[in-house]
């Protein structure tokens, strides 16, 4: 609920359909319904699909929610994002033009939308790549998670993105977790990952074993907006038991991947 105010702003940035999964208690669900009925922006949008998952445990079932959102998608492609990101203005139209040029129908490709972040609650949202680069140079924006988890997006190669005018291919690497545009008929997110840690990394890894190719879009971007730390990231940072359990889940996932896909997945075991 604490990030729900982002929804109206997302609707102002993204003109296309939205599939939204919400994790709420009964009381929060009623509050959301009132909010949606009173919001002029949301009332005007007829292409948002909502699905409420009721809260019944202490952990946040992030990948279950992602699978719920994927299930109700009725377009051939999907942009996998989180509610705390704002896409650039016009990204929907940009992607509609980019997808045919990338021959997505006849190949396994995942298109990367480079992610940035701001530490300010109010920003002059860049209207173009040029404006974003200016704000990046001024220190108003940063590459996403540059200070806490740089390897999660390092393969995006932000230095190359700055000067690129054409999509460019990048290779998968361990811990890579970009935000992607991909055909909707992709493997589900692994639901054993709840809360913080490895929920997107595991999905990107499975796409890699299925031989998807990753291409960075040169004129696309999204910006993460600041919010209070979630309960799960606080647990990850403070609890050695939480981190130990996550490490065991990672090893289990890699073993299962090798059993499912054979020799192609052995390279992931070498990083245990």
Image (cartoon, grey):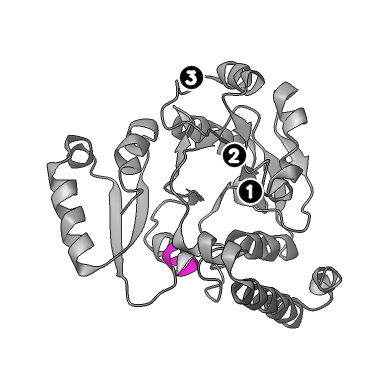
Answer whether residue 227 is magenta in the image.
no
The numbered disc on residue 129 is none
Q: Which residue is mark 3?
A: 127
Q: Position of residue 262 (x, y in %)?
A: 79, 79
* Mark 3 Cα-neighbour bin, 10 Å: few <14, some 14–19, many ≥20: few
Inter-mark Cα distance, 2 to 3: 16 Å
Q: Pick out the residue farthest to the front.
A: 238
Is mark 2 in CB contact (under 8 Å) with mark 3? no
User: Along the polypeptide, which appears first: circle 1 or circle 2?
Assistant: 2
Mark 3 touches mark 1? (CB < 8 Å) = no
Q: Main secondary structure of the magenta part?
A: helix
Q: How many marks?
A: 3
For the C terminus, the image quarter is bottom right
User: Residue sitting at 50 percent across and 21 percent down?
Assistant: 126
Measuring from the top left, give residue 259's x and y in whole percent.
74, 83
Nearer to us in this view, 30 or 129: 30
Please report whichever mark, 2 or 3, sits nearer to the chain's N-terminal start: 2
- Image check: 233 left or right of 84? right
Magenta-highlighted residues: 63-67
Q: Work out which quarter of the rendered image holds the N terminus and state it.
A: bottom left
Q: CA distance from mark 3 to mark 1?
A: 22 Å
Q: What residue sits right under mark 1 in the picture? A: 178
Query: x, y (%) of residue 210?
Result: 71, 64
Q: Which mark is residue 113?
A: 2
């Amino acid at each position: 609920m604490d990030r729900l105010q982002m929804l109206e702003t997302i609707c102002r940035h993204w003109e296309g359909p939205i599939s939204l999964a919400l994790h709420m208690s009964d009381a929060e669900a009623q509050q959301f319904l009132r909010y949606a009925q009173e919001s002029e922006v949301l009332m005007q949008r007829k292409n948002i699909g909502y699905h409420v998952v009721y809260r019944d445990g202490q952990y946040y079932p992030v990948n279950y929610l992602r699978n719920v959102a994927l299930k109700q998608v009725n377009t051939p492609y999907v942009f996998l994002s989180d509610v705390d990101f704002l896409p650039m203005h016009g990204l929907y139209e940009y992607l509609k033009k980019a997808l045919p040029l990338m021959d997505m129908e006849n190949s396994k490709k995942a298109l990367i939308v480079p992610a940035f972040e701001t530490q300010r609650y109010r920003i002059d949202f860049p209207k173009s790549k040029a404006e974003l680069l200016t704000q990046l140079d001024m220190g108003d924006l940063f590459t996403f998670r540059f200070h806490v988890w740089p390897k999660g997006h390092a393969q995006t190669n932000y230095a190359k993105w700055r000067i690129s005018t054409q999509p460019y291919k990048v290779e998968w690497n361990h811990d890579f977790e970009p935000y992607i545009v991909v055909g909707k008929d992709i493997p589900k997110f692994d639901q054993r990952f709840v809360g913080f840690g490895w929920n997107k990394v595991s999905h990107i890894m499975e796409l890699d074993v299925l031989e998807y190719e990753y291409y960075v879009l040169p004129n696309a971007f999204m910006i993460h907006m600041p919010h209070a730390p979630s309960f799960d990231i606080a647990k990850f940072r403070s609890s050695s038991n939480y981190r130990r359990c996550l490490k065991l889940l990672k090893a289990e996932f890699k073993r299962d991947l090798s059993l499912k896909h054979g020799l192609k997945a052995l390279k992931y075991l070498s990083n245990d």
